[in-house]
Amino acid sequence: MKTRLLGGVVALVLAIVGAILLSSYVQAADNRAQAGMEPVEVLVVQQPITAGTTVDELKSMVKMQSFPKTAITDGAVTQLDDFKGRVAAVDLVPGEQLLAARLVDPKSLAAPNSVDVPKGLAEISLVLPLDRVLGGELQAGDTVGVFISYNDGVAPGTKEVPATKLQFHKVLVTKVGTGDGGVDTTDSQENQSAKSSSSVLVTLAQSGTDATKTVHGIEFGHVYLSKENADTDTAPVDTLHKDQVLR
């Protein structure tokens, strides 16, 4: 009798201990689940955003939304104040969480060998032989002097009056690439390749008035470029005629 009673007490104690342990486990699991469900607010894209959009511009294109902590993507942005001056590195689509890795320095998106065009200026491109563009050593961001020469007809009604002038100073080069050098399509492929490799496509930023003069020089005369620097003398230079060269 005593043995049965003792066995019953032991069984009861074990049952109570088991219940306590089970309850503790369930409570811990519930706490873990609740921690994972804890809401966190992050910025979510609301409309298509193109690469290059500034942080200031995309402020109106995103809004805060709550997600369970376990659903938050690593690097999700919770505020834009830490990303001033940055731009979207890629196109963003509605519904995606805004990630820090997709907000980058705008310089990292710049096209190779190009710079921005100053406000108010336009770009024009010139295909020039290597000997008229420093052997092709120009880079975007350089400034150049623009020489324009005419073989004749410098003034209306004149004949055979060759003239050259350093017409412009400090002209910004915005892009540099290879050009076709005005290759004749009837020329042989070998000759076309040779001509292409001996010319450079240079894009300049100029006002409409200056660009018109440069285009006129290309169309009816010859253009040379000189690389300038901060110390280059930019004083006006008179037009030089043939009879003045050997004085």
Image (cartoon, rainbow, N blue to C red):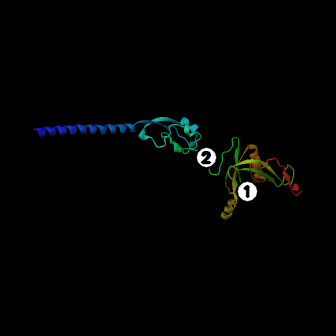
Residue 185 visible, this angle: no
Label 2: how many residues lie within 10 Å, few (<14), some (14-19) or many (20+)? Answer: few
How far across and down, in percent of the image, does residue 46 sit? 50, 37
In the rendered structure, the answer to whether residue 234 lies left or right of residue 23 reads: right
Label 1: how many residues lie within 10 Å, few (<14), some (14-19) or many (20+)? Answer: few
Circle nearer the N terminus (1, 2): 2
> What residue does disc 1 label?
134
The residues tagged by marks 1 and 2 sit, at their Cα atoms, a distance apart of 27 Å
Residue 201 visible, this angle: yes
Tell me the quarter of the image containing the N terminus: top left
122 vs 142, nearest the viewer? 142
Residue at image coords 27%, 39%: 21
172 vs 129, nearest the viewer? 172
Q: Which image quarter: residue 3?
A: top left
Residue at image coords 35%, 37%: 31
Q: Which image quarter: residue 160?
A: bottom right
Residue at image coords 68%, 60%: 197
In the rendered structure, the answer to whether residue 12 lies left or right of residue 136 reads: left
Q: Is residue 192 above or below residue 89?
A: below
In the rendered structure, the answer to whether residue 47 lies left or right of residue 226 reads: left
Please give the label number shown on residue 107: 2
Tell me the quarter of the image containing the C terminus: bottom right
Amino acid at circle 1 = Leu
Label 2: element kind: helix
Amino acid at circle 2 = Lys
How far across and down, in percent of the image, does residue 156 sit? 85, 49
Q: Is residue 197 above or below residue 13?
A: below
Q: Is residue 76 above or below residue 159?
A: above
Label 1: element kind: helix
